[in-house]
Amino acid sequence: MIAQLVTSFIASAAFGVIFNAPRRSLPQCGLVGMVSWAVYILLNGSYSTVLATFAATFVVGATSIVFARLYKTPVIIFSVSGMIPLVPGGMAYDAMRHFVENDYNVAMQLAAQAFFISGAIAIGLVLAEVLNQMLRKVGSRI
């Protein structure tokens, strides 16, 4: 598990480099990716992959918001690089490969799962932002 966490840290920080994130934000980008991958690994054994991805992406959104406030940078710098380990690129590739090989049943199953995981990523990020907006609105009234 340690090797996976280190690898997810490096991958997330490297995508921060690719997306021209500020140099001082790269450790935080890697940390967001590493924490989300840890949540994914811990939940994937007990729950479905889609639910584990949703929870991990929610953690990405929440930690990205916290880091954005702490370091006064846009949220997207941390959220995009943090969710990179969760993107089902390999699964989408396998689905396309099975389509090419005329194995449509397996291809449809993989494509549907990749679609649901992608939806879980989107919903997790949106839910984190909506909860942040609600908490800020409630906090401003008090």
Image (cartoon, grey):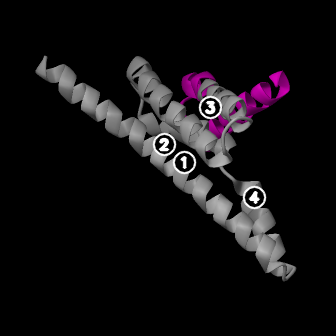
Q: Earlier in the sequence, mark 4 or mark 3?
A: 3
Q: Which of 81 and 120 lies nearest the eye of the viewer?
A: 120
- Amino acid of disc 1: Ile
Q: In this figure, which residue is indicated by the disc labeled 2?
A: 124
**Gap in angstroms between the C-alphas marked 2 and 4:** 19 Å
* Residue 64 drawn above or below residue 96: above
Q: Residues within 10 Å of mark 2 (few under 14, many from 20)?
A: many
Residue denoted by label 1: 121
Q: Is residue 19 visible?
A: no
Residue 24 is one of the magenta-drawn residues: yes
Say which residue appears at 44% left-offset and 20% top-offset. Answer: 71
Q: Which residue is mark 4?
A: 91
Q: How many marks?
A: 4
Q: CA distance from mark 1 to mark 2?
A: 5 Å
For the record, the magenta segment spans 1-29
The x, y position of residue 14, in whole percent, is 70, 36
The local secondary structure at tag 3 comes to: helix
Q: Quarter of the image containing the C terminus?
A: top left
Residue type at numbered disc 2: Gly
Q: Position of residue 58 (x, y in %)?
A: 50, 36
